[in-house]
Amino acid sequence: MMATRINSHLALGAATIQEFRSSLRGELILPGDPPYEQVRKVWNGMIDKRPALIARCAGAADVVACIQFVRSYDLPLAVRGGGHSIAGFSSCDGGLVIDLSLMKGIAVEPIRRTARAQPGLTWGEFDRETQAFGLATTGGLISTTGIAGFTLGGGIGWLMRQYGLACDNLLSARMVTADGRLLNASEQENAELYWGVRGGGGNFGVVTSFEYQLYPVNHVIGGMVLHPASRAREVLQFYRDYVATIPDELALMFAFLTAPPAPFVPESLQGKPAVGIVACYCGAPETAHEIMRPLKEFGPPVVDVIGPMPYTALQTMLDAAAPPGLLNYWKSGYLQELSRDAIETLVIQAAKMASPLSTIHIQQLGGGVSRVPADATAYAYRDAPFVVNIISTWTAPSESEQHVSWTRETWNALQPCWTRGAYVNFMGDESAEQVKQAYGINYARLVALKNQYDPTNLFRLNHNIIPSIE
């Protein structure tokens, strides 16, 4: 009889596979099926896993069937929304992937300013629908990021200083738990579960729809300024001083990068090390000029492409720097301040970047992020002023050791400057202790929630909260 190899100790027969297939409205893909090689790929080219089964779910009932199946046969389980998990948690070897990428339904309620969205949507797809009504919520820094993992991990984006993190704008979540129940989590129903999914990641179940609060955002003042890397130190000092003066309507990110071969970049800077400041101002247009004048005048910059633009243009501005399939390795942390030592270390380490695709991002938090109490959601680090993401990106597998080493070296060099914790959406496959620190003061409460909803740790391919009764 034909069998499907699942892992070293279990094989499923053809009849079992067919029974599972017939229980799904969506598609079941196995190794050897024509779409398998393409469908198994995830965004990070470093991840090369081979699941035994990929269920491309069509709705919540399919997710329930998948949960029942993996529990019956004790299979490894991965859940994929947009597939952007830097650690590769959205796939697995020898188990089942619940692939939600076909679940792209969205319903916008313009009067209530809410949207109900399924987990297969990317932020670009979500924004396309909400912008038809001139509305938006805090989304990803690039438009190809999926809404699901981004929201569950917290959700740092351009609108956060004015309107809070993505998880702060999550009104409710419908989800399938480890025992196969379909629940609604909100302030009124399953309130503790609602608390946990806002920053606790995919530890408690599979969310099949998200309800978001929306805001009137259509056009913004956005874009970037670029300076040559020779001025990195003084530009970063300016950034530190400038962010202390700006209102919540303005969000900024500093970046060490290689200047792109774009028409707006002078040929003398193209392909050369540079520093940039990316801006998004979502306040009153008549006040933008005075607020952003220091940013546009300091230096002055070699490139200044800051001006009025559709919000969707800002959301796609960095997409070209993050295409699927490239090799990526990240490490991140929070900074309490951009001290002299932190600035010096960042400048020295950025000069050692060996790939023109690599970057270091220093993003200002505060504002709406910090106005929420640390224990109001599972996302804990509300008082951190800056989050730093050290991003190695390259194309040749033979260079992996070099780029991974630079990322780790840079993170270690900043060790005296890091404050506690880390942002889980920027974390790789870190140790259990680092994961515990990432959830901070909320970890014990999250463990209690895990004990209640997933005591056997079925949902363990994530930044895992380990149940104490496992």
Image (tube, rainbow, N blue to C red):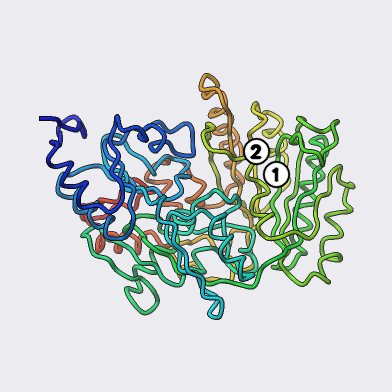
Q: Looking at this view, name the residue that lies furthest to the top.
A: 398
Using the rendered view, name the quadrant where residue 270 is placed: top right
Q: Residue at x 62, y 65 (%)?
A: 131
Q: Viewed as shown, does residue 239 lie left or right of 389?
A: right
**Where is residue 326 shown, x and y percent of the image?**
54, 32
Q: Residue at x 30, y 39 (%)?
A: 29
Q: Quadrant of the N terminus?
A: top left
Can residue 405 be seen by looking at this rendering?
A: yes
**Where is residue 430 shown, x and y percent of the image?**
42, 41
Judge by depth and name the residue closer to the eye, 388 or 218. Answer: 218
Is residue 176 shown above or below 82? below
Q: Residue at x 14, y 49 (%)?
A: 72
Using the rendered view, name the quadrant where residue 221 is placed: bottom right
CA neighbours of label 1 inside 10 A, class few (<14), some (14 to 19), many (20+) = many
Mark 2–mark 1 distance (CA, rounded to whole Å)? 7 Å
Is residue 237 shown above or below 206? above
Q: Viewed as shown, does residue 325 lie left or right of 435?
A: right
Q: Decide: marks 2, 1 in contact (CB < 8 A)? A: yes
Can residue 70 be seen by looking at this rendering?
A: no
Q: Which mark is residue 359?
A: 2
Is residue 344 shown above or below 110? above
CA neighbours of label 2 inside 10 A, class few (<14), some (14 to 19), many (20+) = many
Q: Viewed as shown, does residue 224 lie left or right of 73?
A: right
Q: Earlier in the sequence, mark 2 or mark 1?
A: 1
Q: Viewed as shown, does residue 35 lie left or right of 373?
A: left
**Where is residue 442 shown, x and y percent of the image?**
41, 62
Q: Amino acid at mark 1?
A: Ala
**Where is residue 364 shown, x and y percent of the image?**
66, 56
Q: Which residue is mark 1?
A: 255
Number of marks in the image?
2
Q: Secondary structure at mark 2?
A: strand
